[in-house]
């Protein structure tokens, strides 16, 4: 059975800290890995990773994929209270474009 | 032992047809959602139900009608399907007052 495991499940940090969120996966067919930031309503798309070793960057957020070791990390530097959210990792398992979601990491950034 | 399950996983249908996608959760959650994923991987919320009552109803065509027979089920019925309805639809559930949402694996709808 395909599965995506995120760690830690929750994390509390202070503003200015740097955090690393982990996502490992075991799937029968890998197409891409996606990161979302979930706040009130719908998850916000952050990154899609398909190639190993190539870092995607957007402001203070960056992510990299290791297809050999089957994991991805999401880094957030100089965290702000607005970064508080649940970060979801999902793997696209093939041509149907369906996603297998992890349970998420709940990040709380305190002032 | 799937927490949130959607059926069918794939659906190919002709324009003009009416179809339903079913969602069931066995987590005891009281809130369920339907999302549409667009071609850019963005997830857009369509509906949210809390204890069988409609909470969120974003701007979606009224051809889309959610039905929640009980807390554990939220089905999505679509009338007069159009080509633009082709997408992956995700169901999710959560417990009121908690942020975490659990997602189903999605239903790939293709309208031809």
Image (spheres, coloured by chain):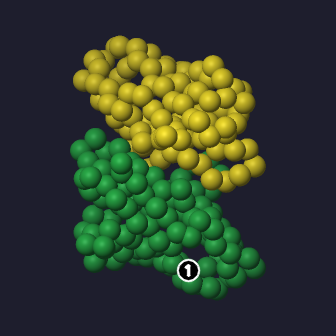
The residue that disc 1 covers is A19
Q: Is residue B70 left or right of residue A97?
A: right
Q: Quadrant of residue B54?
A: top right
Q: Is residue B107 left or right of residue B101?
A: left
Q: Indicate the position of residue A40 as horizontal and vertical percent values.
A: 65, 52
Q: Quadrant of residue B87?
A: top left
Colour assigned to chain A in the rendering is green
Question: Outermost residue toward the front?
Answer: B1
Residue depicted at x 25% and y 72%: A68
Q: Quadrant of residue B86?
A: top left
Colour assigned to chain B in the rendering is yellow
Residue depicted at x 48% and y 35%: B5
Foreground: B8 or B64?
B8
Image mark 1: chain: A
Q: Indicate the position of residue B95 as horizontal and vertical percent values.
A: 69, 44
Element marked by disc 1: strand
Can residue A71 be seen at all in this image of the molecule?
yes
In which quadrant will I find the C terminus of chain A?
bottom right
Can residue B61 be seen at all in this image of the molecule?
no
Q: Indicate the position of residue B66 as horizontal and vertical percent values.
A: 57, 24
């Amino acid at each position: 059975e395909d599965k995506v495991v995120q760690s830690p499940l929750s994390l509390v940090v202070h503003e200015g800290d740097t955090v690393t969120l982990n996502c490992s996966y075991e799937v029968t067919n890998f197409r891409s890995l996606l990161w979302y930031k979930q706040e009130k309503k719908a998850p916000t798309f952050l990154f899609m990773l398909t190639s190993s070793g190539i870092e995607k960057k957007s402001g203070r957020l960056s992510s990299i994929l290791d297809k050999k070791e089957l994991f991805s990390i999401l880094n957030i530097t100089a965290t702000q209270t607005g970064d508080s959210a649940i970060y979801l990792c999902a793997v696209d398992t093939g041509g149907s474009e369906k996603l297998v979601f992890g349970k998420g990491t709940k990040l709380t950034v305190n002032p | 032992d799937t927490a949130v399950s959607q059926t069918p996983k794939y659906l190919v249908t002709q324009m003009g047809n009416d179809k339903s996608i079913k969602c069931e959760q066995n987590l005891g959650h009281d809130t369920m959602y339907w999302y549409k994923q667009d071609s850019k991987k963005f997830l857009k919320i369509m509906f949210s139900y809390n204890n069988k009552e409609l909470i969120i109803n974003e701007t979606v065509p009224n051809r889309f009608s959610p039905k929640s027979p009980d807390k554990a089920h939220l089905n999505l019925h679509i009338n007069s399907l159009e080509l633009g309805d082709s997408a992956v639809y995700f169901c999710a559930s959560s417990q009121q007052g908690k942020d975490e949402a659990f997602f189903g694996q999605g239903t790939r709808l293709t309208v031809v």
